[in-house]
């Protein structure tokens, strides 16, 4: 009987948690994918993020800052996973095949940028995703990563250099066309 009483008492916050999960999971899954470049890893990161949120949900006082908190948990999980597993992770041999058959240049550009982003060190990649994919300010990115705004700025600068190196001459072409689209 005590289990039933506990379950009924928790059902209010569990419903609230379920609603939050349904509303925010797609956006967080997309961010996790951009962060790690692998749908399976992105799903694992997302599940671990929501598991951590579920465990502490009844104690969360600031419901208005849930998105920022969820991002902070997700980015920290990503960075911890990369620190812990970088030696034991399987290394893919060979090159990825060039994408074929895409009529839409936006899709090809996204694939190119995602492939290049995979070659950027994890902390720099995390900063680039927060700043330019999630469109967070320097201060909000610093809060999400648990570091200073100066660290975010320096990691973003280094990350852009690394991304430019990965993309080579395509970097200027990609970002010139992006700027042109924003102006029109």
Image (tube, helix red, strand yellow):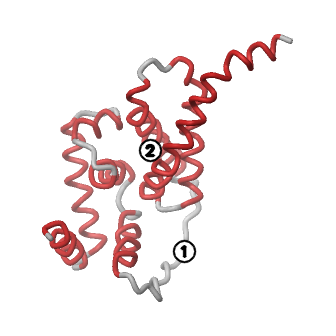
Q: Earlier in the sequence, mark 1 or mark 2?
A: 2
Location of residue 34 in the rendering, given as x and y in whole percent from the top left corner: 42, 58
Q: Secondary structure at mark 1?
A: loop
Q: Residue furthest top?
A: 2
Q: State the residue in front, 4 or 86.
A: 4
Quadrant location of the C terminus? Answer: bottom left
Q: State the residue in front, 33 or 14.
A: 14
User: Does residue 135 sit above or below 178 in this rendering?
Assistant: above
Q: Residue at x 46, y 56 (%)?
A: 36
Q: Secondary structure at mark 2?
A: helix
Q: State the residue in front, 109 or 79.
A: 109
Question: How many marks on residues?
Answer: 2
Q: Is residue 30 left or right of residue 9?
A: left
Q: CA distance from mark 1 to mark 2?
A: 23 Å
Location of residue 179 in the rendering, given as x and y in whole percent from the top left corner: 16, 68
Residue 113's image quarter?
A: bottom left
Q: Residue at x 56, y 43 (%)?
A: 22
Q: Residue at x 23, y 36 (%)?
A: 139
Q: Residues within 10 Å of mark 2 (few under 14, many from 20)?
A: some
Location of residue 163 in the rendering, given as x and y in whole percent from the top left corner: 28, 65
Q: Is residue 182 left or right of residue 91?
A: left
For disc 2, the marked residue is: 79
For disc 1, the marked residue is: 93
């Amino acid at each position: 009987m005590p289990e039933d009483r506990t379950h009924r008492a928790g059902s209010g916050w569990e419903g609230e948690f379920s609603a939050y999960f349904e509303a925010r999971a797609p956006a967080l899954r997309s961010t996790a994918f951009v962060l790690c470049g692998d749908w399976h890893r992105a799903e694992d990161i997302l599940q671990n993020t929501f598991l951590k949120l579920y465990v502490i949900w009844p104690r969360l006082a600031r419901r208005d800052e849930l998105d920022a908190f969820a991002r902070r948990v997700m980015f920290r999980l990503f960075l911890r996973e990369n620190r812990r597993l970088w030696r034991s992770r399987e290394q893919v041999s060979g090159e990825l095949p060039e994408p074929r058959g895409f009529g839409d240049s936006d899709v090809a550009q996204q694939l190119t940028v995602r492939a290049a982003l995979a070659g950027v060190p994890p902390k720099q990649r995390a900063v680039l995703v927060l700043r330019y994919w999630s469109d967070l300010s320097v201060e909000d990115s610093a809060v999400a990563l648990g570091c200073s705004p100066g660290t975010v700025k320096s990691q973003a600068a280094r990350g852009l250099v690394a991304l430019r190196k990965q993309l080579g001459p395509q970097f200027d072409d990609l970002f010139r066309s992006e700027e042109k689209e924003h102006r029109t």
